[in-house]
C-alpha cells in the first residue's frame, strides 16, 4: 500500500499514526485531503463531495435524524515532531496527535465500519482551522454549501480528553481609543494626555465582576480583560492617542448583539473616542437538551463540561445545528512540541461513537 | 578669504550666515570647531583651549568676576535648508539659524570686539548637544576639566527670543512596572492581569495636581505625565507585564533626590513591582539674585521668564555656577525645516552683551 493511501482497516490508533505521518500544515493540506477523499470513495455506502481541500461524505438512508461528525485535517507547523512515535505506554507522540488527527482517525473509522448507522451521517474533513478565521474551511463550506452541513446534531472531534464539552463561549475583541492633544512634556498644560484619559477604562476592567452562567447544567465563566494597551509618542511628548484592547469571553446565553451592547455599557461613561470591533465570534449553546444530544450523552457517558475556548461548534450553532466537542485529544497538549495522545482514549472514543450509531 | 575661515570683522548677523553655511551636524563638528579655534587664536587677548571638538577661549585679566558665554556648535540634521538665505525682511533662513549659530555668532563677536571686558570671560563652544546626553561636549568638558568652566555666572546662548530665561526645570523619567500571570483569556480566572494592575497608576496621574512654584519672581509650572504605556502578549492571553513610563518635569526648588522621592510617594500605594529610573537630569536654579545676574538683567533689559524645558544651564548649576538662557534664536522654530531667525534680534543681543561687559 502506498504511503499516502490510507488503510481504514486498521484501528483508529494506528490510523492516527498514519495520518500524522502525512504532513498537513495549514495551507498545505492537499496531499492529506486527496488521501481522505480517495479512501472515502472506496466506501460504496457513502456519497463523497469536495470543495477546495474540504472533503465531505454522507449516508443517504432516509433516517429520522442526521448527525455531523466534523474535524479539521490541518495542524500547526511541525516542530521536529514528525514522524510519529509510539512509546511502550501506548502514547503516540507527534504533531497533530491530539489536535486533531486522532479525532479524524475516529471519524474515518466510523465512516468505514458503520455502513448502516441508526442516524444518517455526514462526515466533514476541513482545512485551515489553525489559522485566520476567514481561511477556515468549515466556514467556506458553510457559506458556499450550507445544505451540506444540515443536520439535527453535530459532534466536533476537537481534543476534549474523551469528555463531552458543550457549546462554547463567544469571544469579542474591541479596541477602545482615547484621544488627547500633543505637547512638549515640559509644557504639559498645553496638551491633553490620552493615556490619562484611559484611567477609567482600566478602572472598569479592574472592578469588573464576571458572570457565572448555568446553561443545561453547565457553568460558563465569563471574563472581560485588557489584552493589550498601547500609547505614547516619545519620552518628552504628551501622547495624543491610547488604545486599550479588551477581550470579552461570554456565555452562550448572549447573542453577539447582546455581548457588544454589554461591553459598550461597561465603558459607557469613559471618554472613548472610538469603539472599534476588532474581532467577534459568537457563542454556541451546548444544545444538550436536544433528543439527539441526550442519546449521545447516554451512549458516550461521562458528565458534560462547559467549553470556555471558542471552537468551530459555533459555526454549527450559527447554522441552527446544536453541537458538542468530543474527541480523544488532550487540549492542554495541543500546539506543543511534546504533543501526544493516549491511544487507549482514541480506541474508547471510536468504540463509544460506534455504539451510539449502531444501538 | 577661504570659505571655512571665519570673518569676525563682520556683524553677528552676517557671521551667523557664514556659520550656517559650514555644516556641523552632531558628530560632524570638526570643520567648524577648527574654524572657530583658528579664528580665536588670531585674538591675542585670549587663551585658547581645545578638548575634542570643544573649543574654549578666555581672558585672564584678574577681574573680580568671571563670566561664561556658552553655546553648542552642532545642529540637527540638515533638511535641504543649507546654505542660508536672507530675505528682504531681514530674516535669515536655514538649519541652525535659531538653534543656535546666531548665539555662537554673538559669542564670537563679543570675543573679537571686547578685548578688555569688565569681567573676565570664558567662551565655550561645544559639540553634540542635539544628541544623547552622554555625548554632550559640555558634559565632557565638565567631567574632564571642571576648572575650565569655573565662573561666577554663565550665559547660555540657546534660543530664547532675546529674552532672559532663568534656570531650567528638571526632568525625571521613570518606568513603572506592574506584573501578573499569563493565562488563556478564555480562562482568565487562571491568570492575573498586569494591565488591570496599572489602573491605580493612571488614576494617580489623572488626579495629579501639578505645583506652580515661585523662585526669584519666576513661576515654574510642573507636570507629571504618562508618556508611554505598553502591555500585552497576544489577543487571547492575559498579560503578565505592563509598563507605564512617567515623565516628571519639576521646578528647580527640588533636588534630584527630592524629585525621585516625590514620584515614589505619588505611586506608593500602587502595586508596582519595579520602579525603574530611565533618565534623570536635575533642574537649575535661575540664580537671578546673584550680583552678576542682577547686573546682567539691568544691562540686557526685559523681564526674566522661567525656562520649562531642560537645557545645559543645569550643567553649570551642577558645578555651582548660576546660569541663564539668553540667545537671539526663536525656540519654537528650532529643528524645523523652516528654521529662521530675525537678524535684528541677533544684532540687539550682540549690542546688549557688549554693553553689559564694557559698562
Image (cartoon, coloured by chain):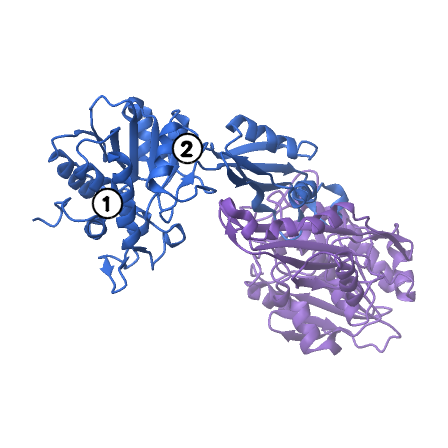
Chain colours: A purple, B blue
At x 64%, y 53%, the residue is A244
Q: Are the residues flagged by discs 2 and 1 from a single subunit? A: yes
Mark 2 or mark 1: name the one nearer the start of the chain.
1
On the image, the x and y values in percent for residue A213 come to 87, 54
For the C terminus of chain A, the quadrant is bottom right
On screen, residue A121 above or below B287: below
Question: Dot 1 corresponds to which residue?
Answer: B105
Of residues B149 and B166, the one drawn nearer to the viewer in this rendering: B166
Looking at the rendered structure, the secondary structure element under dot 2 is helix
Q: Is residue B154 visible?
A: yes
Of residues A48 and A52, the one drawn nearer to the viewer in this rendering: A52
On the image, the x and y values in percent for residue B281 come to 46, 33
Q: Is residue A283 visible?
A: no
- Label 2 lies in what chain? B
Looking at the rendered structure, the secondary structure element under dot 1 is helix
On screen, residue B267 above or below B1: above
Image marks 2 and 1: residues in contact by CB distance under 8 Å: no
Question: Dot 2 corresponds to which residue?
Answer: B314
- On the picture, is A217 further left or further right than B334? right
- On the picture, is A262 further left or further right than A100? right
Q: Quadrant of residue B262?
A: top right
Label 1 Cα neighbours within 10 Å, binned few <14 / some 14-19 / many ≥20: many
Of residues A247 and B297, the one drawn nearer to the viewer in this rendering: B297
On screen, residue B69 above or below A255: above
- Label 1 lies in what chain? B
Label 2 Cα neighbours within 10 Å, binned few <14 / some 14-19 / many ≥20: many
The count of marks equals 2
On the image, the x and y values in percent for residue A319 come to 78, 72
Between disc 2 and disc 1, the foreground one is: 1
At x 28%, y 23%, the residue is B145
For this orientation, the residue located farthest to the front is: B359
Amino acid at each position: 500500500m502506498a504511503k499516502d493511501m490510507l488503510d481504514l482497516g486498521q484501528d483508529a490508533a494506528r490510523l492516527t499514526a498514519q495520518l500524522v505521518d502525512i504532513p498537513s500544515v495549514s495551507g498545505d493540506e492537499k496531499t492529506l485531503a486527496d488521501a481522505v477523499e480517495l479512501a472515502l470513495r472506496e466506501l460504496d455506502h457513502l456519497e463523497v463531495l469536495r470543495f477546495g481541500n474540504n472533503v465531505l461524505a454522507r449516508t443517504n438512508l432516509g433516517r429520522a435524524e442526521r448527525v455531523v461528525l466534523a474535524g479539521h485535517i490541518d495542524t500547526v507547523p511541525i516542530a521536529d515532531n514528525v514522524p510519529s512515535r509510539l512509546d511502550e505506554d501506548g502514547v503516540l507522540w507527534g504533531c497533530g496527535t491530539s489536535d486533531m488527527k486522532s479525532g479524524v482517525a475516529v471519524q474515518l473509522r466510523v465512516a468505514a465500519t458503520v455502513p448502516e448507522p441508526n442516524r444518517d451521517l455526514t462526515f466533514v474533513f476541513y482545512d485551515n482551522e489553525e489559522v485566520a478565521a476567514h481561511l477556515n474551511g468549515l466556514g467556506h463550506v458553510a457559506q458556499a454549501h450550507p445544505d451540506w452541513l444540515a443536520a439535527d446534531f453535530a459532534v466536533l472531534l476537537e481534543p476534549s480528553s474523551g469528555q463531552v464539552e458543550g457549546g462554547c463561549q463567544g469571544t469579542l475583541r474591541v479596541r477602545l481609543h482615547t484621544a488627547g492633544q500633543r505637547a512638549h512634556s515640559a509644557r504639559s498644560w498645553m496638551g491633553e494626555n490620552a493615556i490619562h484619559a484611559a484611567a477609567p477604562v482600566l478602572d472598569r476592567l479592574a472592578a469588573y465582576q464576571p458572570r457565572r452562567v448555568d446553561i443545561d447544567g453547565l457553568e460558563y465563566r465569563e471574563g472581560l480583560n485588557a489584552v493589550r494597551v498601547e500609547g505614547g509618542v516619545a519620552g518628552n511628548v504628551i501622547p495624543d492617542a491610547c488604545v486599550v484592547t479588551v477581550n470579552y469571553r461570554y456565555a452562550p446565553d448572549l447573542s453577539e448583539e447582546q455581548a457588544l451592547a454589554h461591553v459598550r455599557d461597561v465603558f459607557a461613561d469613559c471618554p472613548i473616542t472610538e469603539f472599534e470591533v476588532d474581532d467577534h465570534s459568537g457563542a454556541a449553546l451546548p444544545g444538550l437538551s436536544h433528543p439527539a444530544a441526550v442519546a449521545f450523552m447516554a451512549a458516550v457517558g461521562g458528565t458534560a463540561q462547559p467549553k470556555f475556548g471558542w471552537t468551530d461548534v459555533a459555526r454549527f450553532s450559527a447554522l441552527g445545528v446544536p453541537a458538542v466537542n468530543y474527541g480523544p485529544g488532550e487540549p492542554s497538549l495541543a500546539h506543543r512540541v511534546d504533543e501526544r495522545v493516549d491511544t487507549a482514549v482514541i480506541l474508547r472514543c471510536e468504540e463509544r461513537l460506534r455504539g451510539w450509531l449502531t444501538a
